[in-house]
Image (cartoon, rainbow, N blue to C red):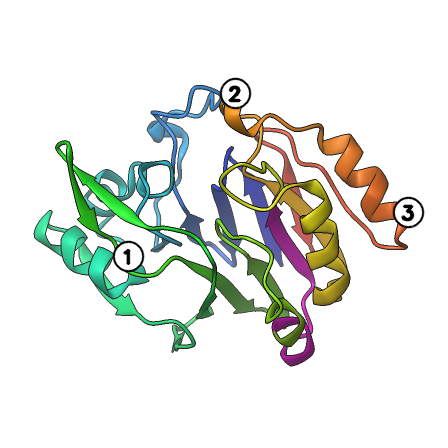
Protein backbone atom coordinates (compact mmCIF):
# COMPACT_ATOMS: atom_id res chain seq x y z
CA UNK A 1 0.00 0.00 0.00
CA UNK A 2 1.28 3.45 -0.94
CA UNK A 3 0.34 6.95 0.09
CA UNK A 4 1.17 10.06 -1.94
CA UNK A 5 0.99 13.42 -0.17
CA UNK A 6 1.19 16.72 -2.05
CA UNK A 7 3.35 19.37 -0.38
CA UNK A 8 3.19 22.14 -2.97
CA UNK A 9 4.93 23.08 -6.23
CA UNK A 10 6.53 19.79 -7.34
CA UNK A 11 7.02 18.24 -3.91
CA UNK A 12 5.43 14.89 -3.10
CA UNK A 13 5.95 12.65 -0.08
CA UNK A 14 5.47 8.96 -0.86
CA UNK A 15 5.07 6.38 1.90
CA UNK A 16 5.66 2.73 1.00
CA UNK A 17 5.38 0.14 3.77
CA UNK A 18 6.88 2.41 6.39
CA UNK A 19 9.56 3.84 4.07
CA UNK A 20 9.41 7.52 3.11
CA UNK A 21 10.52 9.09 -0.17
CA UNK A 22 10.31 12.80 -0.92
CA UNK A 23 10.56 14.37 -4.38
CA UNK A 24 11.76 17.96 -4.91
CA UNK A 25 11.47 19.06 -1.23
CA UNK A 26 10.79 22.78 -1.69
CA UNK A 27 9.26 23.49 1.72
CA UNK A 28 10.41 26.33 3.96
CA UNK A 29 11.00 28.79 1.09
CA UNK A 30 7.68 27.97 -0.57
CA UNK A 31 5.30 30.86 0.22
CA UNK A 32 2.27 28.60 -0.25
CA UNK A 33 3.45 25.62 1.79
CA UNK A 34 2.30 25.42 5.43
CA UNK A 35 4.36 22.30 6.25
CA UNK A 36 7.32 22.70 8.60
CA UNK A 37 10.31 20.38 8.40
CA UNK A 38 9.34 18.94 11.78
CA UNK A 39 6.19 17.58 10.14
CA UNK A 40 8.20 15.65 7.54
CA UNK A 41 8.71 12.07 8.74
CA UNK A 42 12.12 10.41 8.76
CA UNK A 43 13.14 10.05 5.14
CA UNK A 44 14.84 7.10 3.49
CA UNK A 45 15.25 8.55 0.01
CA UNK A 46 15.25 12.03 -1.52
CA UNK A 47 14.73 12.36 -5.29
CA UNK A 48 15.48 15.62 -7.10
CA UNK A 49 14.49 16.24 -10.72
CA UNK A 50 16.83 19.18 -11.36
CA UNK A 51 18.94 21.87 -9.77
CA UNK A 52 16.66 24.90 -9.50
CA UNK A 53 16.13 26.17 -5.96
CA UNK A 54 12.39 25.40 -5.97
CA UNK A 55 13.29 21.74 -6.42
CA UNK A 56 16.45 21.31 -4.33
CA UNK A 57 14.69 23.17 -1.53
CA UNK A 58 15.52 21.64 1.86
CA UNK A 59 17.17 18.51 0.43
CA UNK A 60 20.54 18.95 2.14
CA UNK A 61 19.01 19.78 5.52
CA UNK A 62 16.67 16.78 5.36
CA UNK A 63 19.39 14.43 4.09
CA UNK A 64 21.69 15.37 6.96
CA UNK A 65 18.85 15.20 9.51
CA UNK A 66 17.83 11.67 8.55
CA UNK A 67 21.03 10.26 7.03
CA UNK A 68 18.88 9.87 3.91
CA UNK A 69 20.25 9.15 0.46
CA UNK A 70 19.76 11.68 -2.36
CA UNK A 71 19.39 10.39 -5.91
CA UNK A 72 19.67 13.00 -8.65
CA UNK A 73 21.62 13.95 -11.79
CA UNK A 74 25.40 13.63 -11.72
CA UNK A 75 26.38 17.30 -11.59
CA UNK A 76 23.86 18.20 -8.91
CA UNK A 77 24.73 15.05 -6.94
CA UNK A 78 28.39 16.07 -6.80
CA UNK A 79 27.47 19.55 -5.60
CA UNK A 80 25.18 18.11 -2.90
CA UNK A 81 27.95 15.72 -1.84
CA UNK A 82 30.19 18.75 -1.29
CA UNK A 83 27.58 19.93 1.24
CA UNK A 84 27.91 16.67 3.19
CA UNK A 85 24.94 14.75 1.75
CA UNK A 86 25.04 11.07 0.80
CA UNK A 87 24.29 10.82 -2.91
CA UNK A 88 23.88 8.46 -5.83
CA UNK A 89 24.38 10.20 -9.19
CA UNK A 90 21.94 9.17 -11.92
CA UNK A 91 21.82 9.73 -15.66
CA UNK A 92 18.91 10.07 -18.07
CA UNK A 93 17.63 6.59 -18.92
CA UNK A 94 19.38 5.05 -15.92
CA UNK A 95 17.45 2.83 -13.48
CA UNK A 96 18.43 2.19 -9.88
CA UNK A 97 16.94 -0.55 -7.72
CA UNK A 98 16.53 -0.21 -3.97
CA UNK A 99 15.07 -2.67 -1.49
CA UNK A 100 11.57 -1.13 -1.63
CA UNK A 101 11.56 0.95 -4.82
CA UNK A 102 13.14 1.34 -8.25
CA UNK A 103 13.67 4.72 -9.87
CA UNK A 104 14.46 5.59 -13.47
CA UNK A 105 15.36 9.05 -14.70
CA UNK A 106 13.72 10.19 -17.92
CA UNK A 107 14.20 13.02 -20.36
CA UNK A 108 12.76 16.44 -19.55
CA UNK A 109 13.18 19.62 -21.59
CA UNK A 110 14.08 22.37 -19.16
CA UNK A 111 17.07 24.33 -17.89
CA UNK A 112 18.95 23.35 -14.73
CA UNK A 113 21.33 25.54 -12.75
CA UNK A 114 22.54 25.72 -9.17
CA UNK A 115 22.37 29.01 -7.30
CA UNK A 116 25.46 28.73 -5.08
CA UNK A 117 25.48 31.90 -2.96
CA UNK A 118 24.58 34.02 -5.96
CA UNK A 119 26.89 32.23 -8.39
CA UNK A 120 25.09 30.26 -11.10
CA UNK A 121 26.62 26.82 -11.65
CA UNK A 122 25.83 24.24 -14.32
CA UNK A 123 23.30 21.80 -12.87
CA UNK A 124 23.33 19.04 -15.48
CA UNK A 125 20.27 17.86 -17.37
CA UNK A 126 16.77 18.29 -15.99
CA UNK A 127 14.87 15.02 -15.64
CA UNK A 128 11.58 13.35 -14.93
CA UNK A 129 11.41 10.29 -12.69
CA UNK A 130 9.64 6.97 -13.05
CA UNK A 131 8.99 5.28 -9.71
CA UNK A 132 8.24 1.56 -9.55
CA UNK A 133 6.96 0.16 -6.24
CA UNK A 134 4.37 -2.34 -5.01
CA UNK A 135 3.47 -3.24 -8.57
CA UNK A 136 2.59 0.40 -9.36
CA UNK A 137 4.25 2.97 -11.61
CA UNK A 138 4.30 6.69 -10.88
CA UNK A 139 5.67 9.18 -13.39
CA UNK A 140 6.80 12.55 -12.01
CA UNK A 141 7.52 14.56 -15.15
CA UNK A 142 9.62 17.22 -13.41
CA UNK A 143 9.74 20.66 -14.98
CA UNK A 144 9.37 20.09 -18.70
CA UNK A 145 8.02 21.26 -22.01
CA UNK A 146 5.90 18.90 -24.05
CA UNK A 147 8.09 16.49 -26.01
CA UNK A 148 7.22 13.67 -28.38
CA UNK A 149 9.09 10.97 -26.44
CA UNK A 150 6.36 11.19 -23.78
CA UNK A 151 4.55 8.84 -26.17
CA UNK A 152 7.43 6.41 -25.78
CA UNK A 153 7.39 6.73 -21.98
CA UNK A 154 3.69 5.85 -22.11
CA UNK A 155 4.26 2.91 -24.45
CA UNK A 156 7.11 1.45 -22.38
CA UNK A 157 5.41 1.82 -19.00
CA UNK A 158 2.02 0.92 -17.57
CA UNK A 159 1.67 4.21 -15.67
CA UNK A 160 -0.80 4.37 -12.80
CA UNK A 161 -0.31 8.04 -11.84
CA UNK A 162 1.31 10.70 -14.03
CA UNK A 163 2.15 13.98 -12.29
CA UNK A 164 2.43 16.81 -14.81
CA UNK A 165 3.31 20.52 -14.61
CA UNK A 166 0.59 22.90 -15.76
CA UNK A 167 1.98 26.30 -14.72
CA UNK A 168 3.07 27.51 -18.17
CA UNK A 169 5.82 30.17 -18.57
CA UNK A 170 8.62 27.86 -17.30
CA UNK A 171 7.00 24.51 -18.22
CA UNK A 172 4.06 23.03 -20.07
CA UNK A 173 0.82 24.91 -19.68
CA UNK A 174 -2.65 23.40 -19.45
CA UNK A 175 -3.16 22.51 -23.13
CA UNK A 176 0.29 20.95 -23.62
CA UNK A 177 -0.18 19.04 -20.37
CA UNK A 178 -3.44 17.58 -21.70
CA UNK A 179 -1.64 16.52 -24.89
CA UNK A 180 1.03 14.84 -22.77
CA UNK A 181 -1.69 13.05 -20.83
CA UNK A 182 -3.19 11.66 -24.03
CA UNK A 183 0.22 10.31 -25.04
CA UNK A 184 1.16 8.84 -21.65
CA UNK A 185 -2.00 6.70 -21.31
CA UNK A 186 -1.85 6.74 -17.50
CA UNK A 187 -4.76 5.64 -15.35
CA UNK A 188 -4.89 9.01 -13.56
CA UNK A 189 -3.25 12.46 -13.81
CA UNK A 190 -2.27 14.96 -11.09
CA UNK A 191 -1.30 18.59 -11.79
CA UNK A 192 1.73 20.28 -10.20
CA UNK A 193 3.98 23.32 -10.51
CA UNK A 194 1.28 26.00 -10.55
CA UNK A 195 -0.03 28.87 -8.37
CA UNK A 196 3.11 29.08 -6.22
CA UNK A 197 4.10 32.42 -7.73
CA UNK A 198 2.42 34.97 -10.06
CA UNK A 199 4.24 33.77 -13.20
CA UNK A 200 2.70 30.29 -12.96
CA UNK A 201 -0.85 31.09 -11.89
CA UNK A 202 -3.31 28.69 -13.51
CA UNK A 203 -6.80 27.37 -12.88
CA UNK A 204 -6.45 23.64 -12.15
CA UNK A 205 -10.17 23.14 -12.70
CA UNK A 206 -9.80 24.33 -16.29
CA UNK A 207 -7.09 21.66 -16.64
CA UNK A 208 -9.32 19.03 -15.01
CA UNK A 209 -12.22 19.89 -17.34
CA UNK A 210 -10.00 19.46 -20.40
CA UNK A 211 -8.56 16.21 -19.05
CA UNK A 212 -12.02 14.79 -18.45
CA UNK A 213 -13.39 16.02 -21.79
CA UNK A 214 -10.72 13.84 -23.40
CA UNK A 215 -11.97 10.79 -21.54
CA UNK A 216 -9.10 10.83 -19.06
CA UNK A 217 -9.10 10.78 -15.24
CA UNK A 218 -7.56 13.62 -13.24
CA UNK A 219 -7.38 14.56 -9.58
CA UNK A 220 -6.45 17.92 -8.08
CA UNK A 221 -4.54 17.68 -4.82
CA UNK A 222 -4.55 20.63 -2.44
CA UNK A 223 -1.64 21.19 -0.08
CA UNK A 224 -1.47 18.30 2.37
CA UNK A 225 -3.94 16.09 0.51
CA UNK A 226 -3.12 12.36 0.54
CA UNK A 227 -3.87 9.76 -2.13
CA UNK A 228 -4.00 6.16 -0.97
CA UNK A 229 -3.02 3.66 -3.65
CA UNK A 230 -4.17 0.09 -3.08
Marked residue nearer the N-terminal end (2 or 1): 1
Residue at position x 52%, y 66% from top? 130
Tell me if mark 3 has few (under 14), some (14-19) or many (20+) residues whose alpha carbon lies within 10 angstroms of its own.
few
Q: Nearer the viewer, residue 191 or 206?
A: 206
| Label pair 3/1, CB-CB below 8 angstroms | no
Residue 213, numbered label: 3
Q: Which residues are magenta?
A: 153-165
Residue 70 tag number: 1
Lower position in the chain sequence, tag 3 or tag 2: 2
Side (left or right) of 39 relative to 145: left
Q: Mark 3 and mark 2: span between their CA atoms? A: 27 Å
Q: CA distance from mark 3 to mark 1?
A: 39 Å
Residue drawn at (12%, 33%), measured in percent from left and top? 117
Query: Quick check: 225 left or right of 68?
Result: right
User: Is 82 situated left or right of 75 in this image?
Assistant: left
Q: Is residue 31 above or below residue 40?
A: above
Q: Residues within 10 Å of mark 1 (few under 14, many from 20)?
A: many
Q: Are marks 3 and 2 in contact (CB under 8 Å)?
A: no
Disc 2 designates what residue? 198
Amino acid sequence: KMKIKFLGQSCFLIEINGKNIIIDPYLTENPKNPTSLNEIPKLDLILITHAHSDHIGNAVELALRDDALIVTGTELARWLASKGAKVIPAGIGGKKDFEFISVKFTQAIHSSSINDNGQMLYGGLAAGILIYAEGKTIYHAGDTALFLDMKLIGEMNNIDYAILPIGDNFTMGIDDSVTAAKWLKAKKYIPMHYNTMPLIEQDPYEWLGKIESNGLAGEILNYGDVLEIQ
